Amino acid sequence: MAEGYRIFGAEMSPYSVKVRSYFRYKAIPYQWILRNADSQAEYEKYAKMPIIPLVVTPDGTGVQDSTPIIDRTEKLHPEPSIHPDDPVARFVSVLIEEFGDEWGNKWMFHYRWARDVDQISSAGRIARMRGPRASEQEHQALAGQVRARMVDRIWFVGSNAVTAPQIEAGFLDMLRLLDNRLASRPYLFGGRPALGDFGLWGQIYEMWTDPTAGALIGGGAPHVLDWVHRMLWPKAEGPFETWSTLEPTLMPILTKHVGRQFMPWTCANEKALAEAKEEFSVKLGDNTWTQKPQKYHARSLGVLRAKYAEVADKTALDPVLEAAGCLTGLRG
């Protein structure tokens, strides 16, 4: 049953490399298929949405969206588990994965398309992926088209002249906290990767491949850099830790970034959609964040709340979420 998986993805897609890293950790045999013109016909046969990654299972079922792909596969291949036994750590890992997917993507997309050097690098790599046999003239034309299209879409993650300093300051602070977090353990939750590692790593790995963010990671966060490389082929090096040993260096991440940034933003996005607003603003710490609402984020928040509701005993979990500023948003 484990043979015959196919992953349609791209090296420059954080969600694609996230799923590939997971399959590698699980030692699940797979075929990595670059989604471009050569594979488009087969991709369209299974895809219901124009996104990657797409995983085609051995029985011919197409599954999309990185979190549902991992959730589904984890049920079929539960060992080694990516979920800590400690109930608090287990849900915090789920929360970090969501944060990485939804807020970490803002860092990645902003840094990739905000400056000329990153635009040129990224557009060129995407153009080579899409047209590997293109002539130099064709390549330059395609790279120009990619650059124009992606720079025009930077608003999608909320990046603009007002929010850019917030995004960059937030990433630098997270980089500092992560480097401290990873100084004495190989993975975020101990001796083996958890769901939270995969979600956050996918974004930071992509940033490492880009000129500006890559220099910040490589030049200022050696433990994060080690983790970036380690997660390409993750393995179990020890057990998961309990919340009591994780809390000192993980709680600052939860409080400063998940509780004060991500949770109020995602709840404000949900409210703006419910009220059919064209744009919304939300106070994040000392700053005001303004962007257009996005439907996917509201659906993703609903899934996160459902996972929280499934936690049978919240006695130890709720005080942690309350202290981090996340509990109200998760209760809806």
Image: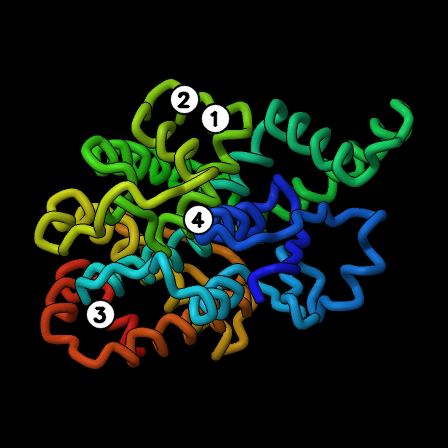
Amino acid carrying mark 3 in the image: Leu
Q: Residue at x 15, y 66 (%)?
A: 322
Residue shown at the point (36%, 48%) measured from the top left: 197
Which numbered disc, 3 or 2, marks the residue that appears first in the sequence? 2
The front one of 302 and 245 is 245
The mark nearer the N terminus, 1 or 3, is 1
**Callout 3: SS:** helix
The residue where tag 1 is placed is 214
Relative to 137, is 55 above or below?
below
Of the residues under marks 2 and 4, which one precedes in the sequence?
4
The amino acid sitting under disc 1 is Gly
Residue that mark 3 sits on: 327
Q: Which residue is label 4 attached to? A: 25
Provide residue 247's location: percent of width, then percent of height: 13, 50
Q: Amino acid at mark 4?
A: Tyr
Label 2 close to label 1 by CB (< 8 Å): yes
